[in-house]
Image: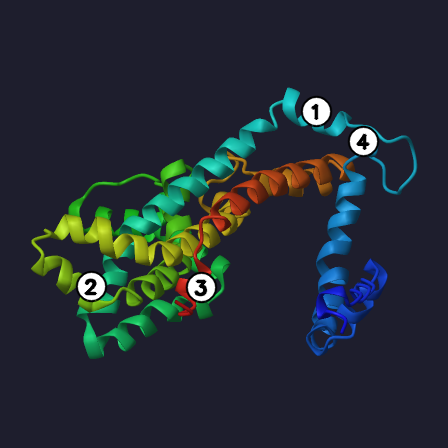
């Protein structure tokens, strides 16, 4: 009787080619359902981005895809004074994130831990400004801070007999406007992150002898960090592309990246240079976004852990 060990081994099943695997993946219900969104994404985002990228390698004042490819626009950005708007934009964005975190963390802690039934009304008060145009709100600050005829200057002159002058057209005023506009984008994700911190873990750490700083550093902050990072990331990306705050509250004294791009595309009629500035800003912001996203624990933030 032949041993079963001597039975021939069946041949391995043929592995599908990459084309067959791609076809199977494209036929999945999830991909079919998401295809309208994917098509919209390709047309509305990837397409214009590819066009801008192509224009950035064309000679200056070129309005079509003709002419030799060149990197002169990028060299021009690095060699001329175009680095100044990048310093202003990224510096103001970083300062905005820092100020928003300092303000939003205690407010978020109150919403998540202290306010109780009053948390919903307070949250509503914080949401209401988002229903008003950003430009309208900033113009309100412009009227308050305007020299001579401004509300602040007029009130101090009438009540106390002295003129405050103008507080406009300074980096501090621009920063105040950016914090005012972008604070909710830091506040709400931070509140979500703090709401995920289990109360029993904080109580257990306290019972084991941990002080308030140790509880914050070892328990509260690590768990809330994904929400804090998302809020910081969202605020930073929006603040880098901000233009209304600088134009309304900063005047012509401070030129940010968005203003430089607008000037290149409109007044200077130099589309390749404007495209190069745009791609440079996208590249720097994208690197920072990827760095932060690698540190995010989205499973914890979405409640999957």
For discs 2 and 4, the disc positioned in front in the rendered view? 2
* Any part of residue 297 in sight: yes
In this image, 34 relative to 226: left or right?
Answer: right
Residue corresponding to mark 1:
76
Label 4: how many Cα within 10 Å (few below 14, some 14–19, many 20+): some
Q: Which element carries disc 3, helix, strand or loop?
A: helix
Query: Of residues 243 and 212, which is closer to you in this image?
Result: 212
The answer to whether the residue labelled 4 contacts the one labelled 1, judged by CB atoms less than 8 Å apart, is yes
User: Could you give the CA–CA distance between mark 2 and mark 4, rounded to whole angstroms?
Assistant: 61 Å
Query: Of residues 295 and 241, which is closer to you in this image?
Result: 295
Residue corresponding to mark 2:
201
Looking at marks 2 and 3 on the same chain, the residue that comes earlier in the sequence is marked by: 2
User: Could you give the CA–CA distance between mark 3 and mark 4, rounded to whole angstroms?
Assistant: 47 Å
Where in the figure is residue 17, as x and y percent of width and height?
Answer: 84, 60
Residue corresponding to mark 4:
60
The answer to whether the residue labelled 3 contacts the one labelled 4, judged by CB atoms less than 8 Å apart, is no
User: Could you give the CA–CA distance between mark 2 and mark 3, rounded to whole angstroms?
Assistant: 19 Å
* Any part of residue 259 in sight: no
Looking at marks 4 and 1 on the same chain, the residue that comes earlier in the sequence is marked by: 4
Identify the image quadrant of residue 28: bottom right
Looking at marks 1 and 2 on the same chain, the residue that comes earlier in the sequence is marked by: 1
Label 3: how many Cα within 10 Å (few below 14, some 14–19, many 20+): few
């Amino acid at each position: 009787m032949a041993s079963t060990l001597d039975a021939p081994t069946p041949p391995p099943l043929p592995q599908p080619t990459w084309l067959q695997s791609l076809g199977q993946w494209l036929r999945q219900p999830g991909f079919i359902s998401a295809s309208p969104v994917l098509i919209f994404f390709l047309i509305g985002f990837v397409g214009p981005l590819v066009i801008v990228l192509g224009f950035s390698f064309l000679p200056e004042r070129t309005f079509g895809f003709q002419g030799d490819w060149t990197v002169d626009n990028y060299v021009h950005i690095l060699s001329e004074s175009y680095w100044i708007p990048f310093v202003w934009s990224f510096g103001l964005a970083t300062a905005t994130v820092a100020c928003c975190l300092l303000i939003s963390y205690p407010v978020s802690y109150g919403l998540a831990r202290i306010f109780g039934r009053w948390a919903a009304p307070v949250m509503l008060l914080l949401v209401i400004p988002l229903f008003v145009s950003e430009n309208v709100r900033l113009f309100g600050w412009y009227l308050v801070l305007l020299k001579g005829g401004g509300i602040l200057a007029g009130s101090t002159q009438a009540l106390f007999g002295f003129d405050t002058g103008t507080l406009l057209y300074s980096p501090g005023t621009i920063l105040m406007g950016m914090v005012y506009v972008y604070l909710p984008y830091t506040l709400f994700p931070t509140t979500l992150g703090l709401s995920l911190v289990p109360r029993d873990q904080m109580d257990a750490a306290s019972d084991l002898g941990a002080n308030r700083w140790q509880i914050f550093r070892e328990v509260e902050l690590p768990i809330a960090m994904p929400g804090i990072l998302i809020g910081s990331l969202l605020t930073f990306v929006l603040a880098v592309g901000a233009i209304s705050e600088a134009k309304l509250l900063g005047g012509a004294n401070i030129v940010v990246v968005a203003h430089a791009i607008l000037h290149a595309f409109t007044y200077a009629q130099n589309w390749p240079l404007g495209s190069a500035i745009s791609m440079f800003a996208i590249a720097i912001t994208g690197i920072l976004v990827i760095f932060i996203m690698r540190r995010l624990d989205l499973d914890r933030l979405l409640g999957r852990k």
